[in-house]
Amino acid sequence: MENPKLTLFIIFYFTVLNTAKAADPDKEPFVGVNIGTDVSNLLSPTDLVSFLQVQKITHIRLYDADPDLLKALTKTKIRVIVSVPNNQLLAIGSSNTTAASWIGKNVIAYYPETLITAIAVGDEVLTTVPSSAPILLPAIESLYSALVAANLHTQIKISTPHAASIILDPFPPSQAFFNQSLSSVMLPLLQFLSKTGAPLMMNLYPYYVFMQNKGVVPLDNSLFKPLTPSKEMVDPNTLLHYTNVLDAMIDAAYFSMKNLNITDVMVLITESGWPSKGDSKEPYATIDNADTYNSNLIKHILDRSGTPFHPEVTSDVYIYELFNEDLRSPPISEANWGLFHANTTPVYLLHVSGSGTFLANDTTNQTYCIAMDAVDTKTLQAALDWACGPGRANCSDIQPGEPCYQPNNVKSHASYAFDSYYHEQGKTSGSCDFKGVAMITTTDPSHGSCIFPGSKKVSNKTKTVVNSTQISGAADRLRFISLRGNQISANAIAFSILLFIPFMTPWWGVVQ
């Protein structure tokens, strides 16, 4: 017989649960982007922020604390991780006064108008500048003390990004451990992260795992491609099944922490991506592979499936990177990790079906051409006149009384005319420029009864979101969600190994 009290409790429980989810979207996983600055003709801070808003990018990581950009981010909903460059660690780690000054100048001066969510102290310090290892934790602690003094330590977390190579024997994940030569730094650092609720920041690149283990690690596993059960990677110690390399890398970090008795620190992926171009030594750095990896990465994170070891926790990820950094030194791939060129045109169009607004909505690989912000009216009017005149764009819908006449301003009319010309030209290279006053977007600019030419061409097709993901929530998700242990009896493991080993495709290799 049905228990009415139990039924009432269940209804109440799920009502509260759903209400909590709706009220606190910050706990939803997100995808952000890294912004490097080795770029020719980098957008001005104001234009960069406008571009981020057009693309619906709400989480970014900077490699410094650029004052002009932090000022431009004021009163936006964009969350930002600021960074302490490696060359500033010594001064900050040696002086509490210097640390307090850094916090005052780069955080307090902008927060909360600019939504700074975390501070990344250095970048891959333990592997790129090992001589600075002894000063890393003192620098972090000094900065944290300054945050405490400003009463910002609960809003802004402090950590440091690591290369994957700090973890040895990472495959299978259950036998991974931190490089023991780094123990004097890693253990107290992890204890600090545990105490302060900050994440372990990791730069994780399945691309490099694949390149260093070709013939052992399949390309499909690296790109999140669907696998048959026989091709799934199986950890013989836990019998956990891995369908992609990234999950295995994340779990290697969790197992490494567990080996040091740290079980309440979550992993934040501060960098991950795939290059779209390389030299003859990097034949897998292609547009197709970069598109596949980043599209599938976005879908994987927003599916909120976690990892095999911790399915209840999905790591947030920052894609490396927003723009191709054309000023980077060789190899060629170093300059080709971006989602966009410096002129804001996409390097490729991400394919993420039905997942919201990140990197803007699009339909069936659709792009639009619109007027850029902050262009003077006279210049825009000249471009509009050319598009509707010699350019032979169809401008009938922006005439008085027509659906796109309102809002009656040059920018709106120019955007419609630019999009008309762009699509009539078949979206060919250079057809969305207009002497530098136009830009390509994947956000449909249609509004009300005004349907832009690009939308008209696909209005009867099934929607596919391109350069798109769901950014749920508006704040960082650097708080830890309790992790549960994964306990399997020894007898069960032994029996299951005998059962599954014949079907395993071993690929565990040694990576960087």
Image (spheres, rainbow, N blue to C red):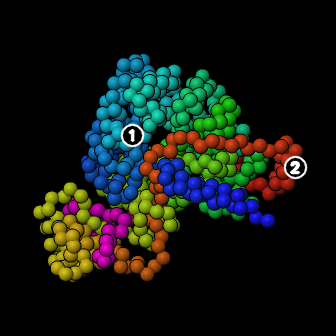
Height in image: 223 above or below 361? Answer: above
Give the side of residue 61 with respect to residue 414, left or right.
right
In the foreground, 336 or 4: 4
- State the mark number for residue 495: 2
Q: Residues within 10 Å of mark 2 (few under 14, many from 20)?
A: few
Residue 434 is inside the magenta segment: yes
Q: Is the magenta region chiefly helix, strand or loop?
A: loop
Name the quarter where the N terminus is drawn. bottom right
Q: Which comes sooner in the sequence, label 2 or label 1? A: 1
Q: Is residue 171 visible?
A: no
x then y, percent, for residue 429: 32, 67
In the foreground, 194 or 411: 194
Give the side of residue 219 with respect to residue 72, left or right.
right
Height in image: 500 above or below 189? Answer: below
Q: Nearer the viewer, mark 2 or mark 1?
A: 1
Height in image: 442 above or below 36? Answer: below
The boundaries of the magenta stretch are 429-452
Q: Is residue 448 visible?
A: yes
* Residue shown at 44% from the left, 46% from the top: 475
In the foreground, 175 or 289: 175
x then y, percent, for residue 325: 37, 47
* Residue shown at 21% from the left, 73% from the top: 406
Give the side of residue 226 with respect to residue 81, left or right.
right
Pick out the residue farthest to the left.
Answer: 378
Q: Please, what is the three-letter code of the amino acid marked with disc 2? A: Phe
* Residue shown at 68% from the left, 50% from the top: 308
Q: Please, what is the three-letter code of the amino acid marked with disc 1? A: Ile
Q: Secondary structure at mark 1?
A: strand
* Residue shown at 26% from the left, 49% from the top: 46
> For mark 1, what is the residue?
116
x then y, percent, for residue 216: 68, 50
Q: Residues within 10 Å of mark 1 (few under 14, many from 20)?
A: many
